[in-house]
Image (cartoon, grey):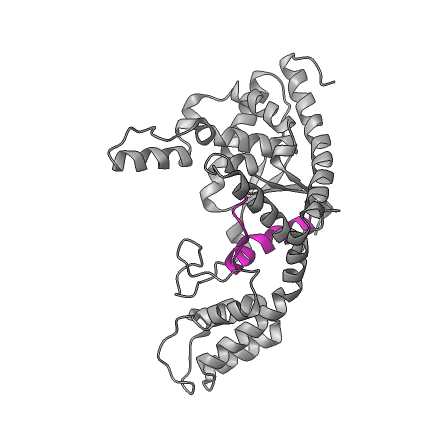
Amino acid sequence: MSSKAAAKTILTGVKPTGAPHIGNYIGAIRPALELAAAHEKSFLFIADYHALNAVRDPAALKRDSYEVAACWLALGLDPAKTVFYRQSDVPEIFELTQLLAAVTPKGLMDRAHSYKAAVDKNREAGRDADADVNMGLYTYPILMAADILAMDTDIVPVGKDQVQHIEFARDMAGYFNNTFKEAFKLPEYRLAGETGAILPGLDGRKMSKSYGNHIPVFIDSRARRKLVMKIVTDSKLPEEPKDPDNNTIFQIYAQVADASGVAALREAFIKGGMGYGDAKQKLFDALEQAFEKPTAIYNDYMADTKKIDALLAQGAERARGEARKTLSRARAATGLNPLR
């Protein structure tokens, strides 16, 4: 790792949508944690204001925010190294949103994927194009740009569907810098798929809560084993050779077991002699070993959410310090009075 790479600032935002499944962990959480560990500065925030565009249950928003915080902490987030905070606890972000809105053309928002998807869905249903489209959804990219620019972010790890948001953040930073004077760094994206694997679910399709084919990370042993035993397999007999690279059991196992275990299971599949029942038991054992300690940590945090509140408050204080520096530059560029 070069010193130049280490000096880059990483930022990740997570919507509070409850506890994750192992596909989330392997495909997004683990790569994000590894990326943060490899760089000098990193930020992770709970995007609770973004969630308000759709969530209307205050209790659910609070519960889900605690769950996602406990999840990242249990899976290895180090709040001493990574600045960990609630988006709603950093008011400077929202003032910055207004400054960016003042230079952002409406046409840019009209092209946002999230807005266009809502419009297309309404038209297909024969409804008014903007039915149930709130301004939070419409201006979602501006708030996201403020999240990113406030922390002088260099790299944002995202999925392919969110690349546009980073491109928009660069556009808005450019509009502002060109209209006034340079105040913002232009961020770059890194596709999460470059480092994170896409895991199949119980039925072989991509693991997803919407498909109901997922295995939660934080679940008791009996429930975990029951789900593992539901993994769909073909009708090959134990003595028949099997293709590990197209087998759901092996693909999940390869992401959670140690190298020697993965090599042994691969060999057993290719040579024959390993039945699917035995393979599922090996997968269950590997999942138990991988998530036993994180589950205990997660349950401890969820049993005492004041611990989470304290860590997020400390993170918010650090995040506000960074955001105030950025906001001060932006205000000075426009001719507004300096922050007090």
Residue 99, above or below 260: above
Q: Residue 12 lies in magenta, yes or no?
A: no
- Quarter of the image holding residue 323? top right
Residue plotted at (49% across, 47% down): 159
Q: Is residue 6 visible?
A: no
Judge from the rendering whether residue 146 lies leftward or rightward of residue 135; answer left or right: right
Residue 312, above or below 338: below
Q: Which residues are magenta?
A: 16-41
Where residue 189 appears, as percent x and y from the top left, is 55, 41
Residue 271, above or below 99: below
- Quarter of the image holding residue 221? bottom right
Where residue 328 appears, as percent x and y from the top left, is 69, 21
Judge from the rendering whether residue 308 lies leftward or rightward of residue 140; answer left or right: right
Main secondary structure type of the part rendered in magenta: helix
Q: Residue 25 lies in magenta, yes or no?
A: yes
* Of the pair 14 and 179, the residue shown nearer to us: 14
Residue 297, above or below 171: below
* Of the pair 325 and 132, the residue shown nearer to us: 132
Where residue 87 appears, as percent x and y from the top left, is 61, 35
Residue extending farthest to the left is 126
